Image (tube, grey):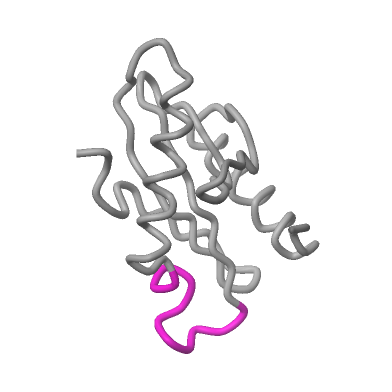
């Protein structure tokens, strides 16, 4: 499935925002049978799986609220698949970058439970 131009732009904004805070981009749009991880970033020793959410309006809780338990489950499964290819298990966390319109990104670190 192709991403919309707005989705690609949102991911680019999120990556640039995180890089400005010292994180390093590992990969974008990593896909497996469980779904897609928008951004995989390195924050020191930690591997950060980032879900980028864009909402033009704040109805229904806005961008951050759109990361539902079902979406979290898919992201966890995809992250496990990603990690299975690594030689050693780094510390991991799941962050959300919520973008609403052209405002400042909202960075939610440890947005939901990790691999435990």
Tell me if residue 37 comes above or below residue 99 in the rendering.
Answer: above
| Observer-nearest of 75 and 46 | 75
* Image position of 56 (left or right of 74): right
**At 46% across and 78% down in the image, what residue appears?**
62
Residue 53: % across, % down:
54, 63
* Image position of 101 (left or right of 114): right
**At 49% across and 53% down in the image, what residue appears?**
51
User: Which residue is farthest bottom?
Assistant: 59
Residue 91: % across, % down:
29, 25
| Observer-nearest of 24 and 8 | 8
Is residue 54 magenta-colored?
no
**At 56% across and 37% down in the image, what residue appears?**
20
How many marks do you count on the picture? Answer: 0
Residue 19: % across, % down:
56, 35
Quarter location, residue 71: bottom left
Residue 99: % across, % down:
55, 65
**At 28% across and 53% down in the image, what residue appears?**
112
Magenta residues, as a range? 56-66
Quarter holding the C terminus is: top left
Is residue 60 magenta-colored?
yes
């Amino acid at each position: 499935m192709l991403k919309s131009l707005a989705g690609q732009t949102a991911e680019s904004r999120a990556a640039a925002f995180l890089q400005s805070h010292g994180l390093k981009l590992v990969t974008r749009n990593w896909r497996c049978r469980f779904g897609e991880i928008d951004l995989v970033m390195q924050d020191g020793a930690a591997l950060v799986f980032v879900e980028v959410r864009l909402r033009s309006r704040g109805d229904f809780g806005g961008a951050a609220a759109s990361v539902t338990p079902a979406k979290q489950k898919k992201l966890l499964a995809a992250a496990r698949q990603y990690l299975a290819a690594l030689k050693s298990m780094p510390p991991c966390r799941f962050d959300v970058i919520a973008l609403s319109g052209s405002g400042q990104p909202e960075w939610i670190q440890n947005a939901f439970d990790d691999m435990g």
